[in-house]
Amino acid sequence: MTSTPHDHAAHLAELTVSRAERLRELHAAPELLQVVNVWDVVSARVVAALPGTTALATASHSIAASFGYPDGERIPVELMLDMAGRIARAVEVPVSADLEAGYGAPGETIRRAIGEGIVGANLEDELKPLADSVAAVRAAVAAAEAEGVPFALNARTDAWLRGHERPREVWLADAIERGRAFLDEGATCVFVPGALGEAEIAELVDALGERRLSVIGLPGVPAPARLAELGVARVSYGPYTQRLALGALEDAAAQLYAGGVLPSDIRPLN
């Protein structure tokens, strides 16, 4: 018997729910969830093929740069969602997308992302008034519930990124207040990007709960094994993975211009 468009749509919906459930499980598991950020299909396939990969995350900054746009919602949302969907359809593991601040319509953006096969997302508060930030999280959670998908919302607060010039106790208290409010609205975990030390991470975990904090693995941030011991749920790497790749390209080009030749051990990863 041939399958119908309805059968295909039902299969995709079932697959999306299954991957969403898996991503939620990975956030709650005792093991730290490490997601290496990708920006296109080939980078996603390379990372997904590694034995240690259980999920992937896109990097909005990196995708925007690939299309020639600066970071900060300057890329059209259609382009961002299209690339995120291409990545999700190219791999077997769950994919979480960095959807910046929701492109002016967090609920609708999450709904469209789910339609592309995305099962989790970062959503930035940009340190907007708390009521506005909470409303954005509420809209995102409601949109996922309406689609019947147990979406993994990584609600991001920029309390450190945009406010770390404030006294330590002030930005930490702000991050905790916002994080608790986001969790109360149904966020899976709270993302506090920044150059956080062990003491700040421990305070945030104590205030938000174990496996509810997400961080970025910047130089100086504790290593993954220690993050797991501290009770962190997830670590990602943002645009730094693309910068590593571009740095390798720049170095190779400079060596070729200087009279060098291509090495003999190039891996055929594309």
Image (spheres, rainbow, N blue to C red):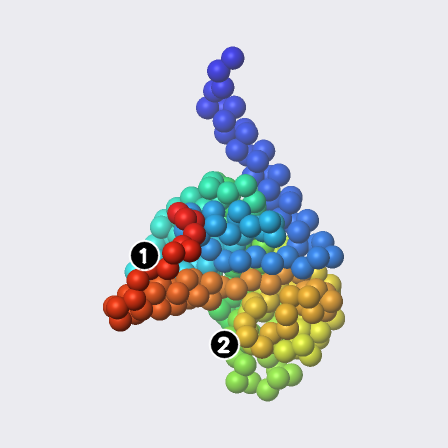
Mark 1 Cα within 10 Å, few/some/many (few <14, many 20+)?
A: few
Q: Is 56 on the left-hand or right-hand side of 251?
A: right
Picture quarter containing residue 181?
bottom right
Answer whether labels 2 and 1 touch (C-beta < 8 Å): no
Q: Is residue 248 above or below residue 52?
A: below
Find residue 26 and report its horizontal and vertical position in percent.
66, 51
Please report the residue visible at 42 percent of the width from the left and 44 percent of the height from the top.
Answer: 86
Q: Could you tell me which residue is drawn at 52 percent across and 64 percent down? A: 237
- Is 180 on the left-hand or right-hand side of 120? right
- The label on residue 222 is none
Q: Position of residue 109 (x, y in %)?
A: 46, 50
Image position of 80 (left or right of 135)? left
Q: Which amino acid does label 2 sit on?
A: Arg
Q: Residue at x 55, y 85 (%)?
A: 166
Classify mark 2: helix, strand or loop.
loop
Q: Quadrant of residue 182?
A: bottom right
Q: Earlier in the sequence, mark 2 or mark 1?
A: 1
Foreground pick, 46 / 157: 46
Q: Where is residue 227, by image quadrant?
A: bottom right
* Few, some or many residues within 10 Å of mark 2 (<14, 14–19, 20+): few
Residue topped by disc 1:
67
Q: Is residue 86 visible to us here?
A: yes
Q: Which amino acid does label 1 sit on?
A: Phe
Give me the disc on residue 162: 2
Tally of marks? 2
Farthest residue to the top: give it.
1
Q: Which of marks 2 and 1 is in front?
A: 1
Residue at the far bottom: name it. Answer: 167
In this orientation, which residue lies closer to the viewer: 203 or 171? 203
- Disc 1 on helix, strand or loop? loop
